[in-house]
Image (cartoon, helix red, strand yellow):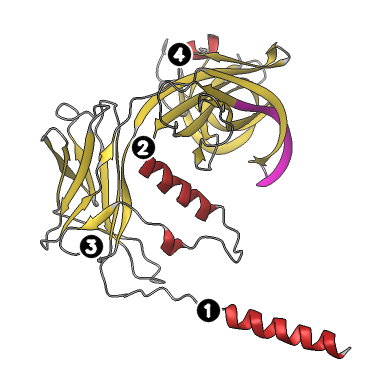
Amino acid sequence: MKPIIILILSLTILLSSCYEPYNIQVDSNQLVLVVNGMITNESTSYKILLNYAAPFNSGSDGIPVYNAVVYVTDNLGNNYSFSTAGSGLYMSDPSQFTGQPGNTYKLHIKTSDGAEYESDSQKLFPEAHPDKIYSEFDNKEVLNKSNGSYVLSHGGDILVDIVNHSDTLPRFRFMSNLVTQYFYDYSQPYQKPIYYYCWQTDNANSDINLTGGKYSISSASINQHNVCFVDDNLLYYGLTYTAGYQGEGLPYKAIPTWEYKSCVVTKRILCLQQYTLNKETYEYYRNLNLQLQSEGKLFDPIAAQLIGNIKSVADPNIKVFGFFEASALSRSAYKIDFRNLTDNQPSVTETNILPPEPNGCEIDNMPLFLIN
């Protein structure tokens, strides 16, 4: 027994000697700038959000940065100013600035105390679209909104193929929203029933969805990338509305209530956003995703390891958090049909008829996007 005891003691001492506490040096009195901003190829007002990080364990939100000078420059020598919109938010003028694929962009910030910051240069690559989008039946756990529990549900994985047309490895990030259209009626004795045609938009995938899995060896094209899962439940736990009287001969106005109930699903539309990422942006999201998926294991990444692309001009050692992103964006939308199948799988059909707003309802009048 002695050799076994000696071996156990030796291993215990060895493991103890390998343990070294990791202490992150944090100055609780230091104002640390946090930057969050993105430009795309879309003609819209771009947003840069500036805050000072709240002290650790303070229980308060970040402190907005007011009266800063914020602008973006490109490799052609252009300078685009951002105007303050309050609460640390700065916005560009879409009539003056739209990101152009092929150009590189750099964010510049000068705070009211004279401190200057800038980002690394970010190249804006051309936008890309799925070459093929389709679905395959699957079973996954989804959140039951009526009771807050997860239940195994039947539905379909939404998959995309993207053909690579360049000599660089394709890098994409997907965001997906699901518009669920539902129906219910309300009737009273001796009165004409009222029909409600409603819709509600939910995030179809809360994870950071990055490509990087199944590539074709010869072309580095993307095959069978799973962007989200859509269940085919016949009922949807939707917000209910009440009929507001607007006058003789006028249609009822749908007024939202605070109540939800199970309603019949009539249609599902998946709204897909595909971002084309440069290498630096891809690595940032990849590291962020690793942190979000960590489970407290020994070699999981720690929060202090997430490094952005913003730095102090005067002193690169000054702590700055956040990331300035330049990514091309393409948008597309698809009807998901579990009843009329394609090759024995859920049907996915592109559509350009979308609801006028994320959530809403019409009474006694089926909206156009519900019909088509």
Query: What is the distance, in whole Å, between disc 3 and disc 2 at their CAs?
Result: 23 Å
- Residue 20: give its label: 1
Q: SS for tag 4? A: loop
Q: Horizontal and vertical percent for residue 235?
A: 68, 28
Q: What stretch is highlighted in magenta?
A: 147-158
Badge 4 density bin: few <14, some 14–19, many ≥20, Cα 10 Å: some
Disc on the earlier residue, 4 or 1: 1
Vertical position of residue 120 compared to residue 306: above or below: above
At a point 23% along the width and 36% down the height, the residue shown is 104
Amino acid type, residue under disc 1 in the picture: Glu
Vertical position of residue 206 compared to residue 335: above or below: below
Q: SS for tag 2? A: loop
At a point 45% along the width and 20% down the height, the residue shown is 332
Vertical position of residue 205 compared to residue 114: above or below: above
Q: SS for tag 3? A: loop
Residue topped by disc 4: 353
Disc on the earlier residue, 1 or 2: 1
Amino acid type, residue under disc 3 in the picture: Pro
Residue 311: name its quadrant.
bottom left
Residue topped by disc 2: 278
Query: What is the distance, in whole Å, between disc 4 and disc 1 at their CAs?
Result: 59 Å
Q: Is residue 92 magenta?
A: no
| Tag nearer the camera, 3 or 4 | 3
Residue 268: name its quadrant.
top right
Disc on the earlier residue, 3 or 2: 2
Residue topped by disc 3: 316
| Tag nearer the camera, 4 or 1 | 1
| Tag nearer the camera, 4 or 2 | 2
Closer to us: 250 or 291: 291
Q: Horizontal and vertical percent for residue 129?
A: 44, 21
